[in-house]
Image (tube, rainbow, N blue to C red):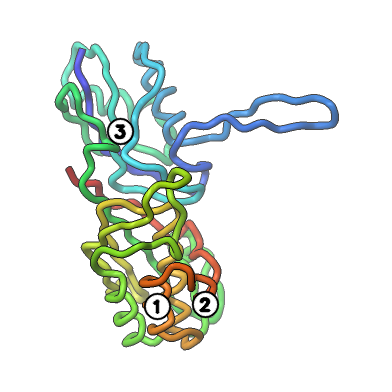
Amino acid sequence: MARYKLILAYDGTGFEGSQRQTRWSSSGASHSTSRPRTVQGELESALRKLGWPGRSVTLAGRTDTGVHASGQVAAFDFEWAHSIEKLRDALNANLPVDVAVQSVEIADADFNPRFDATSRRYRYRLFCQNVRDPLRGKLAWRVWPEVDESWLIEAAQVFLGQHDFAAFGSAPRKGSSTTRTVKLSEWKKADGGWQYEVQADAFLYRMVRRLVYVQVAVAQGRYSIEIVAQALEKPQFKNRIPAGLAPAHGLTLVEVTY
C-alpha cells in the first residue's frame, strides 16, 4: 500500500466543479438524489475499475463549475503492483476525454494535497473584442469596451502582500479568517489578449474571479484604483466596488506548490 500523488488536467466545461457532492432534486411530491458530474467523481470511478477499494480521493483545492485546471493535485492510497507509468496510463484509459492524469509519483504516507500546500497559482485569460468569437470564447472572457493597459497593470499591484480580502471573496468556513498573502499579481499580453497570473498562500471562495472582475472595471474607467485599494484596507466599504464575477470559463488552476 502506498500513497500516490497525481497531477490532473481537465476542461471544466462539462463538470459541476472538482469536488464530489450530493444534490437533492425534486419533481412534484417525489424526491431523489442525483450526483452532479465532478472531477473527483470521475477519478474515483476510474480508480475503482482498477480495483481501488477506497472511499474518497483528496484534492488540493476546489474549483467551481466551469473552471479548468492544468495542475490540480490529488492523492489516494492504493496497493498497485506495477509501475507509476502504468498507473497513469491505466487511469487515463478509464477517464473521460475532458480529464487526464499528467503525472504520478509516490508521496509520503502522510501527504495531504490540501493542507500541505504552501501556495496556489491561477491564470485568467481575456480578450477585448466587440463581437463574439465562439472558439476563442471557450477558454477566455470576451471583454468590451476595451481595457486600458496602464490601468490594468496598475490595478494588479494593489493586491500584492498580506490583506484582508473579505470584500473580494467568501471564507471557506463561517467565521474563518479572510486574510490572505498574495505573492504574484500581474497582467501580461498573450495570444492577442490578456493573461492574469495570481499566486497566494490560499484563496477565498471565488476570490480570483472577483479580483479579475474588479480590475477589468477599473481598466474600463468605471471605477478608480483608489476605491479598490480602500475596499482592500477597509472591507466594510466593499459596496463601493462593483459587484460581479468574471466568468468561470476563463479561469485555470495552474499549479499547487508544497
Please name the residue that numbered disc 1 is placed on. 230
Q: Decide: few, some or many residues near mark 3? Use Cα within 10 Å; few <14, some 14-19, many ≥20.
A: many
Check disc 3 and report its element: helix, strand or loop: strand
Please tell me whether mark 1 or mark 3 is closer to you in this view. 1
Q: Are marks 1 and 2 in contact (CB under 8 Å)?
A: yes
The tag on residue 240 is 2
Tell me which label, 1 or 2, sits earlier in the chain.
1
The residue most toward the right is 28
Residue 192, given in percent of the width and then of the height, sits at 35, 76
Q: What residue is shown at x 27% (from left), y 37% (from top)?
A: 115
Q: Is residue 198 above or below residue 12?
A: below
In the displayed structure, 164 sits above or below 255; it is below
Whether tag 1 and tag 3 are in contact, CB under 8 A, the answer is no
Q: Which mark is residue 44?
A: none
Left or right for 175, reference 107? right
Q: Position of residue 11 (x, y in %)?
A: 42, 47
Q: Nearer the viewer, mark 3 or mark 2?
A: 2
Quadrant for the C terminus, please.
Answer: top left
Picture quadrant where residue 22 is located: top right
The Cα atoms of the two marked residues, 1 and 3, are separated by: 38 Å
What residue is disc 3 on? 74
Name the amino acid type tagged 1.
Gln
Kindly state the secondary structure of the residue where label 2 is placed.
helix
- In the rendered structure, the answer to whether residue 63 lies left or right of residue 256 reads right
Task: Please tell me which residue is depicted at 26% across the width and 62% down the height of the picture.
Answer: 182
